[in-house]
Amino acid sequence: MSALDALPSLAYVMCKKKQGYSYFIKYDCNIWDSVKKRPSKLNPVIIGKIMPPDGSGVICFTPEYIKEHPILKTSAIERRLSPNTNKWEFRELSLEEGHKVFSTELHQAQHKVSAVRSIGTYLLYMHLLQSDPLLAALKHIFPDCWDKLLSVAFYCIDCAYGCIALHYERYSTDTKLPYQQPLSPKVLTTLFQSVSEAQVRSFLADYT
């Protein structure tokens, strides 16, 4: 049995961009709402969350839904736009498809799952840095926090989350980074405040 068989036949995604996630909701059927004069969903039930607010990503199912479908305890299902049809599709993720699975607990989810992190960006940037003095300069001037600074730089370049400090924790959950632990907005502020002007000048001198 495939984990995809555990998906409901009728479901939709409700994006909550301000909250930074999307709801994955199953329902029985469409009905006509005579009061609102529009179609509506009958018996909608939230069965999971998708951390990126655009509705694409790994579905973190609720404990209740996982109890009904135990196969989801050991499987990761991604909702994404098909590169061929540009329509939404679901797929089970595998190492061969360019993702690396880390066994951990997603702090946004309510159950233990395999956190699937994208590694493409990380591999690309680290490959480019092999012939760039930036990495050596960072390690020389910021020996205690170079990996955190580089991770934040990756986040800013990627910019899929809008470069908002509040969203960094989620980004670090989804993406392979030099420093993998989540950094809260408060920790990020402290990190930036710890960088002195003298260190910036030294870094620029080292880098150039």
Image (cartoon, rainbow, N blue to C red):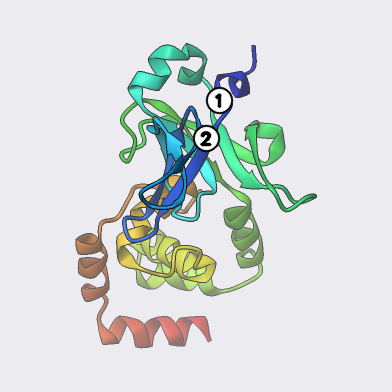
Give whichever of 183, 128 is nearer the camera: 183
Would you place residue 191 above or below residue 96 in this image?
Answer: below
Q: Disc 2 or disc 1, which is closer to the eye?
A: 2
Give whichever of 5, 106 is nearer the camera: 5
Would you identify the image quadrant in which residue 129 lies? Answer: bottom right
Q: Quadrant of the N terminus?
A: top right
Q: Are marks 2 and 1 in contact (CB under 8 Å)?
A: yes
Query: Residue 166: horizontal and vertical position, in percent?
Result: 30, 61
Q: Amino acid at mark 2?
A: Ala
Residue on which disc 2 sits: 11
Would you identify the image quadrant in which residue 4 lies? Answer: top right
Q: Residue at x 47, y 51 (%)?
A: 38
Q: Rate crowding at label 2 as few (under 14), some (14 to 19) or many (20 or more) other CA atoms within 10 Å.
A: some
Disc on res. 67: none
C-alpha separation, residue under disc 2 versus residue under disc 1:
8 Å
Q: Residue at x 40, y 21 (%)?
A: 65
Q: Residue furthest front?
A: 34
Q: Rate crowding at label 1 as few (under 14), some (14 to 19) or many (20 or more) other CA atoms within 10 Å.
A: some
Q: Amino acid at mark 1?
A: Leu
Would you identify the image quadrant in which residue 17 lies? Answer: bottom left
Would you place residue 150 above or below residue 179 in this image?
Answer: below
Q: Residue at x 37, y 73 (%)?
A: 141
Query: Residue 149: horizontal and vertical position, in percent?
Result: 38, 66
Whether residue 144 is visible, yes or no, is no
Mark 1 falls on what kind of element? loop
Residue on which disc 1 sits: 7
Whether residue 87 is visible, yes or no, is yes
Give whichever of 105, 195 is nearer the camera: 105
Q: Residue at x 36, y 36 (%)?
A: 106
Taking 21 as reference, is 95 left or right?
right
Would you place residue 201 above or below residue 33 in this image?
Answer: below
Mark 2 falls on what kind of element? strand
